[in-house]
Image (cartoon, rainbow, N blue to C red):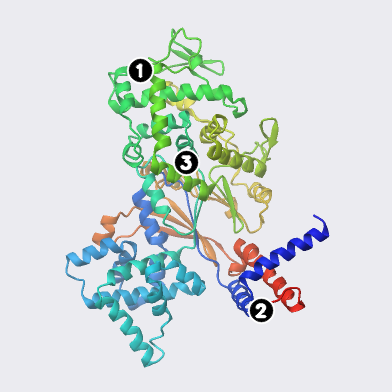
Amino acid sequence: MTDENHENFLDSLLRILSEKYPTKESIYEKLIYLQSRLSLPKGTEHFMSDLHGEYDLFSHIINNCSGVIHEKVDGCFGVRLTTEEKAEFCTLIYYPAEKLKQIKSKNLDTVDWYLKNLSQLLELAKYMSYKFPSFKVREFIPKNYASIIVELMNTRPETEPAQFVYHKKLLDSIVEIDSGDDFIHAFTVLIKRLAVSRLHFVGDFFDRGNRPDAILNLLMTQPVVDIQWGNHDVVWMGAAMGSRVCAATVVRTSLHYNNTEVLERGYGISLRPLAIFASNIYPNDEPIKAAEKAIEMIMFKLEGQLIKRNPDFKMESRLLLDKINFDTKCVNISGREYALNEDAAFPTIQLDASDRYALTDEEQKIIDELQADFTESALLKIHLDYLYKKGGVYTCHNGNLLFHACVPLNEDGTFKQIIFDGTEYVGKSYFDYVDQRARQAYLKRHLEDLDFMYFLWCGLLSPIAGREFHTFERAFIKDEETWKEPSDFYFDLVDDENICNAILEEFGLDAKTGHIVNGHVPVKVSMGESPIKANGKAFVIDGGFSRPYHKKTGISGYTLISNSSSMRLLQHDRIADIKAALKENNDIESDSQIVEIRSKRLTIGDTDHGKKDIHDEIIGLHKLLEAYQSGQLQPK
């Protein structure tokens, strides 16, 4: 761009900006606001991972904001409320509809009860709003109640009698016209949004637990969210876009964990044709097990076809159906013979067939019907769109690097060189390539891009998986040594501070202040493992939210919390469900550990939003003001 073109471009931008700020006074007002806002404390960020369909626990954590609500109630009311009163008040905030129903069933819904709780909700909202400018607080309030709640928050009844009378009349009127329930709901929404400014999810909403659909429905109501896709997410995304092998994998996983409710009731995907087919092929097995065996074989065949047409995936070691010797009942893996299980059966493989990866006509019909069900599910399409809108392979936010599984590394800690279509990728360039290919699948639905989604699910070179799955070995081979799954060196090297610093620098982040946050590998707390790696440079926050993992990890998940003054890790030790919360005002029991204390309190000016968006807007306004003052443009 020539100097003249550059000047013309800047002049055009200033003229566009002048339409929004037509007077010098409007610029003064905005500049004062923006420059002042930079000094406000940074908002609170919550990081979670590997929810795996565990809706009950997740909904409670969303409602209690990972314990932040209880802490704020303690800070606001101190000894003015007893421990029991604070617990009851917190439950009202967590579950307003259910708590109100309970209060009414006991005939406790008196005028005094409403006035007391509305007053306490108002006081708590005022106490928590100090981090936010007034316009942002107003945005957090449900629209239909904003004017009254803003008015209440701006009254100062303690200052003089007229304000006291006005404040009291506002609350009295709310109760008199029988709108107390509505305003309690509105206040609880406001308080939860004040408690957490941004939610980060580093992958895996699906599988294991039975309600990933409900998790995503709830997540879609949250104001500020970002998502880093996990491998259990991308396989569902691939299925929703039409990948047959992804669809077979999703069904197989659901059957394996005896968890088909999400398929049939959540997304309207019928398993009846598969069940009928499986009962004929495996008549001696229980229906669920028979269906799992049938879809598993379809999956292995489709996987084999995919591997053969995608040599760049480097997954040839997974081609095992053609390595089976049916006479000796063994399979050859890397030149060694392994005995198959006594009950290993392959009724849909033609022994003399030249291609053991070919589907039978019946199998082809089954997978065609499943593919149609996945692609035609209206709710699954909504969730697919949301995952692409809010998600990606990685995120750099406020100096932290977020991804699900790993940055592919060599044994010496250098970045692994990975080749696709003759082009070499390492580190950040590989993550960018992977993200681009996943988005290309969403836009074009070409077979090669849908295949790539399956590679992301289970490829050793996939940054979202980082592990070679041994599903065949676990299903058919006696020798458990074959079950061990090779994984990327990252998982062993993440505890090395120098390597973590190199990764942060590769992604353009400050190694002194930045952190890596990922999930994927459950932290075995019961065996002494720690989620804090490399002297606090990295956090592996898969604490086993899903019930099947609780025995493995010994806990019920983690929430990493970053606020203006510190970073701390919440370890959720005990599950609380809504029934227990309402009956006994129980909460989740969590242990809090400070993992970093800021040397200075972080402000909006220290965040990405402050450094880039607000800073750029301030520069633009100053240039517009100069144009007005110099006569280059005429203010209105």
Q: Which mark is residue 183?
A: none
Residue behind mark 3: 233
Label 1 vs label 2, nearer the camera: 2
Three-letter code for the amino acid on which mark 1 is drawn = Asp
Q: Element at badge 3?
A: helix
**Disc 1 residue crowd, few under 14, some 14–19, many 20+, Cα 10 Å:** few
Looking at the picture, tell me which residue is in the foreground, 237 or 345. Answer: 237
Q: Element at badge 2?
A: helix
Residue behind mark 1: 343
Q: CA distance from mark 1 to mark 2?
A: 83 Å
- Percent from the top left, x then y, of residue 334? 56, 19
**Disc 3 residue crowd, few under 14, some 14–19, many 20+, Cα 10 Å:** many
Label 3 vs label 1, nearer the camera: 3
Quick check: can you spot residue 205?
Answer: no
- Percent from the top left, x then y, of residue 220? 43, 53
Q: Which mark is residue 24?
A: 2
